Amino acid sequence: MLDPITRFRERFWKTMVKFDQRSAKRIYIEFRPIDVPEAVRYLTSTLRARFVIMSGVDIPEGIELLYHLSFDGFGKIVTLRTRVNKDSPQIESIAPIIEAASWIEREIAELLGVEFIGHPHPGRLLLAEDWLEGCYPLRSERHKP
Amino acid sequence: MAKTIIPIGPYHPLQEEAEFFQLHVEGEKVVGIDVSIGYNHRGIEKISESLTFDQVPYLVERVCGICSTSHPLAYVQAVEEIGGIQVPERALYLRTIIAEMERLHSHLLWAGLAGHFLGYNTVWMWAWKYREPVLDVLEAVTGNRQNYAFMKVGGIRRDFEKEDIFRIDQILDELKPKIDLLTGAVMDDPVLHARVKGVGILKPEDAYSFGAVGPTARASGIKIDVRRDEPYAAYDRVEWDVITDPAGDVFARVKVRLLELYESVKIIRQCLRDLPGGEISARVKEIPPGEGIGRVEAPRGECFHYVCSDGTNRPVRHKIRAPSYVNVPTCQVTVPGETISDATIILASVDPCYSCTERMQVVDKEKGTTLSGKDLVRLSQEKTALLIKGGHR
C-alpha cells in the first residue's frame, strides 16, 4: 500500500501551494483557504488521519491557521497551513466533516476572531458571555499598524 | 414525559478543568447532554508568549496538577525540534522514569475516585494509600510531590543519585503486589461487572470522529499511543505493550488503566536497569526561528504542543492541546441513553478531572426540587448497593 503522504500529494498536487517535509515525522503543506476543507475531508475520511487540533497564529500578513492531523501508524504529523485576511478573516468550517474540530473552531473564533462559515454550533467556548465584542485576546499587539 | 434539565458543575473554580454538564433527562433516562467549558480559562497560551523559552516549562507544568510532567515534556520536545537539539541519553531515560511514575500515581488516583463514585470507599482509600509512596519517591528525587520542575530545554534539571534508583526500585517492589490486589478485586467482582459492563459504550467510529486519545481510545479498541507511534524519551529502548480492549464500556476503561500500571512498572524497571551515565543536559544556545511540535502520552492521552519561534528569546505562539479537550466531548455519545445514576461514572471514566464530576447539582424544573452533588454520587453508590443486595455476590 502506498504511503498516505504520497497518496495525498498525488491527489492534491494541483491545489497545493507548498509542500514542506521538515523531517520524517513532520510535514507542512500549504493550501489556499478555499481548498482546505476538501484536503481535510480526504485526510480524515479516505486516509483515516486522526484530527489532533488546530492552531491559529497572528502573523503580520494575516491570520495563519494550522490544521494538525496525525497518522498514528506512521508516527507522522501532517500540518495543513493556510492564511486568512485579517480584515475579514473567514474560512469554511471543517466541523461538519470531523466532529473533533468543533470546539477548537469555536475557540479560534473567539480568541482570534476568525469566522468559521457553516459551523454547526457556533458560540462562546472559553470566554465569558459578556466579553467585549471585537476584542480578540490572541491577536498580537505588535502587528498593529 | 416532561423533559428535565440537570446541570452538573462548575461550582468550584479552584479545581482545574472545571466543567459544566447539563443533562437532559426524561424520568431516569438521560436523553441529551450539553457541555460548557471555560470556567477556569487562565490564558496560559497568551502568558506563554510573554515568557522566555526557559521560563515556559514552569508555566505549562501548572496546566494540570496531575500531568505536571507531560506538559513541560511536550513543550521542551517542541523547542528541541525547532533548535535541532540532541538530548543526552541519560536525560532521556530519566525523563521516561518520571513520566511513568506520573502515570502510576495518576491512574491510582483515578482508580480511587472511580471506586468512590461507585460506592467502593475501601477501593478509594486503598488506591490512594498505594499512590502515596509513589508521590513520596517523586518528592525525594525531584524535590516536589507535584510540579517537579524536572524538564528543561535540552535535558533535565536534576540528576538522580544512587540511592534514588534504589528507592524507586524498592517502591516498585512494594507496589506490585498492591496492583495485583487491586486488579484482582476489580476483575473478579461480580457486582462491579454488573454495574459498569456495557455502560457508556464508546464505539470506535465515535472515538475516531471525536479524536479521542489515551485510555479512552484504547478501551474502544483503537491502538494508539504516542509512546509507541512516535517514540520520545527512551520509549523505543524498552520493551512494553500497548494495552487495548475492544469493549468500549466503562469496565474496559477501568481495565486498560489498571493493566497500564503493570506496563509502567515494566518500563521504569528497564530504565533503571539500563540507565546510562553521562551528562543530563545539552548546551543550548539561541533558539532559531521555526516551528516545532512536541507530543507526549500523558496518563489521559496524547498531549500536544505546537511552538513557533521568530528568533527572539520567547515563543511567538504556543498552542497546547490537553487530552481531555478531545476526550470530554465523547460524553455526547456515551451518556445519552443511560440512567442518571450511571452518568457520574461515565463522565468520570474518561478521567477528565474529578472536579467536574464531584460537584453536581440536579434541578428538577417541574417540581422545583434540588439535589446536590452529593446526592448524585449517592444515587450512583445506591445503585451498586442494590446490586449487592440483589444477590450478585
Image: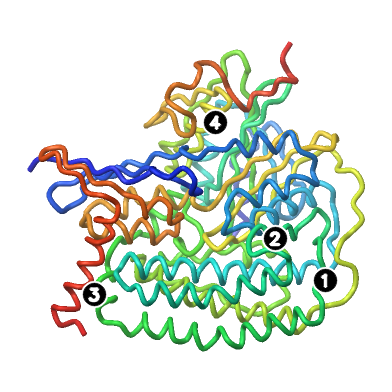
User: Which residue is depicted at the point 36% across and 80% down?
Assistant: B186
- Residue type marked 3: Ala
Q: SS of the residue at dot 2?
A: loop
Q: Which of marks 2 and 3 is nearer the N terminus?
A: 2
User: Which residue is depicted at the point 49% across and 22% down?
Assistant: A131
Up the image or down, B42 lies above or below A2; here it is: above
Place of residue B54 in the rendered image (x, y in percent of width and height, measured from the top left): 80, 47
Up the image or down, A136 lies above or below B336; here it is: above
- Residue type marked 1: Arg
The residue identified by callout 2 is B148
Give the foreground label among 1 and 4: 1
Give the foreground label among 2 and 3: 2
- Quadrant of residue A118 in the image? top left
Place of residue B235 in the rendered image (x, y in percent of width and height, measured from the top left): 69, 70
Looking at the rendered structure, which numbered label has been put on residue B90? 1
- Residue type marked 4: Ile
Distance (Cα) linking label 2 and label 3: 40 Å
Looking at the rendered structure, which numbered label has been put on residue B108? none
